[in-house]
Image (cartoon, helix red, strand yellow):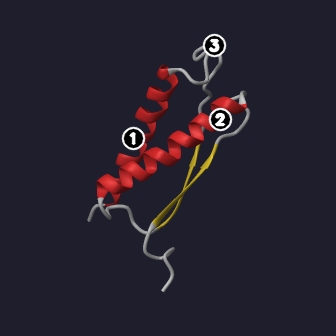
Amino acid sequence: MDNFSQTAWFACVVPKRHARRSVTRNLIKRQIRATSVHVVAEAEGLFPAGAYVMRLNRPFTAQEFPSAASDALNVRVREELLALLRRVACRARP
């Protein structure tokens, strides 16, 4: 039996038009990976098995977050991801 049919898999897409700097895109991707692992562990099997693709659909502008390594950007990305993943976990509950 393969692992894919028993676990939740996450992928991320961060378009250049929404995060112009590669540093910002990489930070967002790292946050997606870390947050998804944290939430799946916290939800303990509440995510249905399968593949999930998270795609950034709103821009993170350089005017709003001048530094790609800023704490404000980290916090905002993490909060939005946690809210999204918890919403998905709540929908998956029987």
Closer to us: mark 2 or mark 1? 2
Q: Secondary structure at mark 1?
A: helix
Work out which quarter of the rendered image holds the C terminus and state it.
bottom left
**Which mark sits nearer the N-terminus, 2 or 1?**
2
For the residues labelled 2 and 1, the Cα–Cα distance comes to 18 Å
- Residue at 59 percent of width and 35 percent of height: 27
Write down the quadrant of residue 29 in the picture.
Answer: top right
Q: Quick one: SS at disc 2?
A: helix
Q: Amino acid at mark 2?
A: Arg
Give the percent coordinates (x, y) of residue 22.
71, 32
Counting from the top left corner in percent of width and height, residue 57 is at 60, 37
The earlier-in-sequence mark between 1 and 3 is 3
Q: Which mark is residue 82?
A: 1
Give the image location of residue 10, x and y in percent: 53, 57
Asked whether disc 2 touches disc 1, contact meaning CB atoms under 8 Å apart, the reply is no
Tell me if label 3 and label 2 are in contact, CB under 8 Å: no
Q: Callout 3, which amino acid?
A: Gln
For image coordinates 57% across by 36% down, the residue present is: 28
Sequence order check: which comes first, mark 3 or mark 2? 2
**Image point (42%, 43%), residue name:** 84
Question: In the rendering, which numbered label is found on residue 51?
Answer: none
Quote the CA–CA distance across marks 3 and 2.
15 Å
Say if mark 1 contacts mark 3, CB within 8 Å: no
> Is disc 1 surrounded by few (<14), some (14 to 19) or many (20+) residues within 10 Å?
some
According to the picture, the residue beneath numbered tag 3 turns out to be 63
- Asked if residue 19 is positioned above or below residue 67 in the image, the reply reads below
Going by the image, does 44 lie left or right of 84? Answer: left
Furthest residue in direction left, as rendered = 94
In this view, the residue farthest toward the front is: 69
